Image: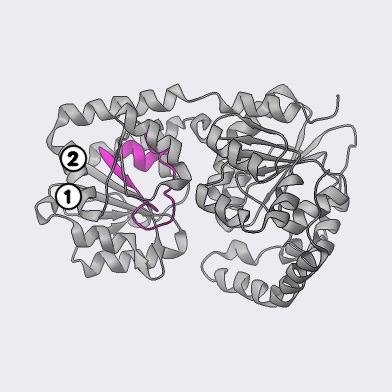
């Protein structure tokens, strides 16, 4: 039997949420200055609906998939494709918390599907959400563990699956400090499909009763031929080597872009085209300013393709990451110079782009280890070492081409998670 969290702890948690709710809504409005999507359908954040249809046809399964942001939404794509192939009559309720996730999620919808904001973690809002739409089951992507969400789904008898699940040692240690809360939260999960055996072991230790290993869905994301061709066309137009600084981030006022551009060897200026794609769109303007303070001749993607005198091309577009990787001779993948765990290296390898990452890779620890063993990734300690690794590949074409082949082979060798996940979800669906 699933342990229940101490009632006082859940009550205090809920009280804190209610007190902070006005600030949460104000923050949404503030973020909406740069990303207007945040200001749309605010009632959904509270489980209030004016025109969204209800459950509809009770004979068709309604699979609720929660993909909080962009990365989780992209990972959900191959799972949804596999599920629809096996269950043609299935409908999807797709929820998000971020504008980037919701924007990307539009492309995953089919006739009869729904897309909503997931309500904040408040009991009343979640009950209204579940009673309105009555999903057959819920699939939470990766690591969405919210106390009230889990408790209310159990109350409403909605099975919850944790797909593409990962749990770093650091996160597991934090949960282990509160064993009763951890047992209640993780014990409410019906089943988890973990990316690795280590993830599965950590989930079981915290209370998940049924945890299997199904691989990483991000390997199964289908290649987009249009984006690949676009990237190769950009590459031909650049007429020089291309180095990509991808998914760069900042933390506590320290920007990876500053660290990298400070350490950039002067000999590379003019010799290579540096393509810089920040992870979060609200940072585009700030990153442009960083590049300009370093004296680099800057052009933004929104202003056109690189010119002969362009030293840094700022990728201020959405949905074109695969094209940027297809364009590059080699790439640095961000979130790894700062203790943020690293961003998605798998997408780079799928385009045949070898990768350099910093010391912080806990979000993709096993994938990074496997990519390094295959020869597709180099892990380094700091920004200066990033440039040394990139320059080594640029200066030695045979090594670079071998790394590019290794990246493609590594990506192909680890596909198959979508089929495994689809079969696992199907076990929890009622008979047709």
Q: Quadrant of the C terminus?
A: top right
Q: Is residue 42 above or below residue 357?
A: below
Indicate the secondary structure of the residue bearing disc 1: loop
Image-quadrant location for residue 56: top right
Report, in whole angstroms, how far the alpha carbon at label 1 lies from the one at label 2: 8 Å
User: What residue would you read off at disc 2?
Assistant: 239
Is there any visible trace of residue 196 in the rendered image?
A: no
Please report the residue visible at 30 percent of the width from the left and 60 percent of the height from the top.
Answer: 257
User: What residue would you read off at disc 1?
Assistant: 308
The magenta region covers 323-349
Front residue of 210/52: it is: 210
Furthest-right residue in this view: 58
Indicate the secondary structure of the residue bearing disc 2: loop
Whether residue 335 sits left or right of residue 19 in the image: it is left
Q: Position of residue 352 (x, y in %)?
A: 34, 30
Do tag 1 and tag 2 residues touch (Cβ < 8 Å)?
yes
Q: Decide whether residue 325 is among the magenta residues.
A: yes
Front residue of 25/145: it is: 145
């Amino acid at each position: 039997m699933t342990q229940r969290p101490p009632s006082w702890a859940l009550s205090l948690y809920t009280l804190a949420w209610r007190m902070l709710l006005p600030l949460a809504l104000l923050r949404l409005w503030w973020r909406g200055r740069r990303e207007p999507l945040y200001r749309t359908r605010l009632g959904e954040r509270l489980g209030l609906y004016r025109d969204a249809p209800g459950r509809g046809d009770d004979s068709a399964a309604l699979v609720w998939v929660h993909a909080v942001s962009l990365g989780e939404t992209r990972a959900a794509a191959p799972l949804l494709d596999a599920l629809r192939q096996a269950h043609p009559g299935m409908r999807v309720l797709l929820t998000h918390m971020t504008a980037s996730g919701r924007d990307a999620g539009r492309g995953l919808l089919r006739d009869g599907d729904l897309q909503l904001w997931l309500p904040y973690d408040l009991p009343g809002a979640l009950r209204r959400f579940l009673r309105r739409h009555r999903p057959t089951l819920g699939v939470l992507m990766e690591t969405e563990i919210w106390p009230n969400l889990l408790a209310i789904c159990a109350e409403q008898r909605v099975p919850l699956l944790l797909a593409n699940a990962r749990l770093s040692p650091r996160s597991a240690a934090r949960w282990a400090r509160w064993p009763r809360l951890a047992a209640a939260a993780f014990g409410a999960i019906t089943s988890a499909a973990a990316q690795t055996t280590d993830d599965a072991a950590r989930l079981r230790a915290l209370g998940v009763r049924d945890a299997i290993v199904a691989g990483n869905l991000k390997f199964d994301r289908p290649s987009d031929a249009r984006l690949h061709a676009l990237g190769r066309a950009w590459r031909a137009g650049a007429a020089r080597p291309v180095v990509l600084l991808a998914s760069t981030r900042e933390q506590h006022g320290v920007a990876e872009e500053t660290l990298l551009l400070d350490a950039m060897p002067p000999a590379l200026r003019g010799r290579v085209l540096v393509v810089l794609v920040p992870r979060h769109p609200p940072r585009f303007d700030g990153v442009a300013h960083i590049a300009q303070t370093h004296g680099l001749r800057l052009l933004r993607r929104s202003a056109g393709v690189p010119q002969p005198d362009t030293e840094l091309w700022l990728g201020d577009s959405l949905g074109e990451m695969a094209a940027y990787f297809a364009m590059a001779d080699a790439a640095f993948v961000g979130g790894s110079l700062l203790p943020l765990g690293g961003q998605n290296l798998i997408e780079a390898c799928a385009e045949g782009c070898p990768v350099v990452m910093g010391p912080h890779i806990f979000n993709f620890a096993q994938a990074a280890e496997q990519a390094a063993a295959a020869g597709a990734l180099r892990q380094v300690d700091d920004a200066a070492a990033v440039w040394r690794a990139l320059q080594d590949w640029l200066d030695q074409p045979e090594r670079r081409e071998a790394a590019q082949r290794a990246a493609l082979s590594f990506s192909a060798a680890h596909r198959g998670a979508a089929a495994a996940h689809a079969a696992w979800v199907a076990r929890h669906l009622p008979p047709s």
